[in-house]
Amino acid sequence: MKSLVFLLLVFFLVGCTHRPPDPVAHSAPPKACLHQDQADTSSTSGQITSDTDGEYIDEEFSSLSEEVTKETVQVRDPIAPWNHLMFRVNDRLYFWILKPLEDRYVAVVPRPIRNSLFNFFHNLDTPVRVVSCALQGRGQETGAEFAKFMLNSTVGILGFRDPAKKYPKLNPKDDEDLGQVLGSYHVGNGFYIVLPIIGPSTARDFVGTLGHILLNPITYINPVEASLGVSGIKSVNKNSFTYQDYESFKKASLDPYTAFRNAYIQHREKELKE
């Protein structure tokens, strides 16, 4: 019984990393979880970037208000009753579990340590970005991602530091993920779905998320409990930078379910065009 409880808890934490796509108990926007990677660079489906003071901002959330005012791309929502239910479940998980957990984590772990952990895990996600760029025939970005990995893994001490950020050519503007790869081959969104814990997605992005799992080195850590534990730490640390943005976006929405759905779809369409 204790093992089951442990696995459920860690699964919750793991789900909060997603896509980039994505990372949070998520009924929230862009990708996989409330907040997608990156402290000093960006993540698989969203970007958290450093401003001039070294503070990190989630570009997904900073552009949400703009996104929802644009003409909405129509994506079928044939399982709306399920999606509404999961939206409410994820919303409760955010307030009951994620927010208290993140509040405590932020209070205990200094920001410089959280930044270093973020850099480390973002560096580990390099295979996803390299394969995604290569499958789209983006040779320059593929080489840049690989060179960035080599520099950060050596000079950056296993990726805990990010010396590559000093070189613009080693930092492609947008992180690529496997959902974008499918989109580049004209695979449609399919239908909209809100996944338990993971949050907003589409049929296409869900397939991309499965590919992300297969390319993620953490997946192959043994035993499985250790793999889930490391993924949980990654999710909690990543979401610690922006988890409160979920509440702000929700409060600003007259119809949160529709607002989050439209913001997610529009954000993904923007990523595909770029």
Image (tube, rainbow, N blue to C red):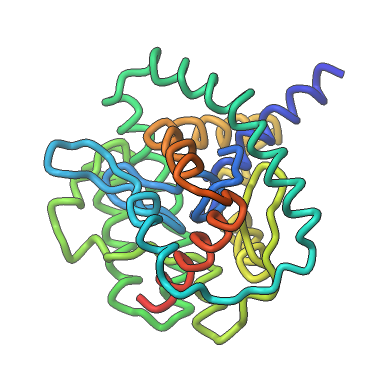
Residue 47 % position (x, y): 36, 53
Residue drawn at point x = 73 percent, y = 54 percent: 83
101 and 262: which one is in front?
262
Left or right: where 175 falls relative to 91: left
Residue drawn at point x = 68 percent, y = 75 percent: 190
176 and 242: which one is in front?
242
Could you tell me if residue 48 is visible in this image?
yes
Is the residue 60 above or below the residue 246 in the image?
A: below
* Residue farthest bottom in this picture: 186
Answer with the quarter of the image where residue 90 lies. Answer: top right
11 and 32: which one is in front?
32
Left or right: where 115 falls relative to 187: left
Left or right: where 74 falls relative to 225: left
Residue drawn at point x = 69 percent, y = 73 percent: 76
Residue drawn at point x = 63 percent, y = 74 percent: 75
How many numbered callouts? 0
224 and 188: which one is in front?
188
Is the residue 267 above or below the residue 8 in the image?
A: below
Could you tell me if residue 217 is visible in this image?
no
Residue 171 % position (x, y): 24, 60
Residue 215 % position (x, y): 56, 58
**Quadrant for the C terminus in the image:** bottom left
Left or right: where 167 falls relative to 241: left
Answer with the quarter of the image where residue 4 lies. Answer: top right
**Quadrant for the N terminus in the image:** top right
Residue 197 % position (x, y): 67, 42
Answer with the quarter of the image where residue 63 lies. Answer: bottom left
* Residue farthest right in this picture: 1
